[in-house]
Image (tube, rainbow, N blue to C red):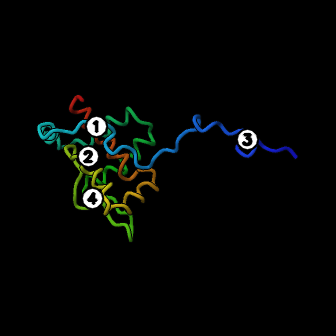
Amino acid sequence: SKKRGGASAGLAPPASERKKPRSPHRSLHLGWSPITEEQRASLREEEKGWLGEFEAYFRGKLSHKNAQQVMKHITPLVAGKGVDFGPGVGNFLAGIPVTISSDVAKILDALHAEGNAAVRDHDDLKGGWHLRHPLYKLREFQAHKLGM
């Protein structure tokens, strides 16, 4: 019988050529410039109806499925429902509506705080779709609105 190629056959690429595994805890702020209080005030003026504009903005930029997932997960955050990760983990951001003027960096800092390890780990299991991805998209939309 023939042996299949692969690492056991000595055909693995050298370590320098292997892809590094993607860290589940990417840079918290992705190199973002902090939003100033003046910029936040400017965004507050657009609080009414911003979610529809957010959806329209990403419907043209993302795949249909990606846009659907972003809206599925940002909507409860905007409504202040947070993300319920179930018994033993809890509900992150419950009672705190996320708005166009929310400090996304501060929310991500809270997610990465020591006391929220279970929430963060559960979000990692979901590929970041429940919290990180929609928050990154919110931050991208904020930058778009501010002309950054």
Q: How far apart are marks 3 and 1 (CA)?
A: 43 Å
- Left or right placement of residue 64 versus residue 95 in this view: right
Tell me whether circle 2 and circle 4 mark residues in contact (CB < 8 Å).
no
Q: How far apart are marks 2 and 3 (CA)?
A: 46 Å
Q: Nearer the viewer, mark 4 or mark 1?
A: 1
Q: Which of marks 2 and 3 is in front?
A: 3
The numbered mark at residue 134 is: none
Q: Residue 115 appears in which quarter of the rendering?
A: bottom left
The numbered mark at residue 104 is: 2
- Reading the chain from its start, which is encountered first: label 2 or label 3? 3
Q: Nearer the viewer, residue 44 or 136?
A: 136
Q: What residue type is labelled 3?
A: Gly
Residue 15 horizontal/vertical position (percent): 60, 39
- Left or right placement of residue 79 versus residue 36 in this view: right
Q: What residue type is labelled 1?
A: Trp
Residue at mark 4? 93
Q: In the image, is residue 3 above or below residue 110?
A: above
- Kindly identify the residue that appears in the image at 45 percent across and 50 percent down: 127
Q: Which of marks 3 and 1 is in front?
A: 3
Residue 65 horizontal/vertical position (percent): 45, 42
Q: Distance between the residues labelled 1 and 2?
A: 10 Å
Q: What residue type is labelled 2?
A: Val
Q: Distance between the residues labelled 4 and 1?
A: 22 Å
Residue at mark 3? 10
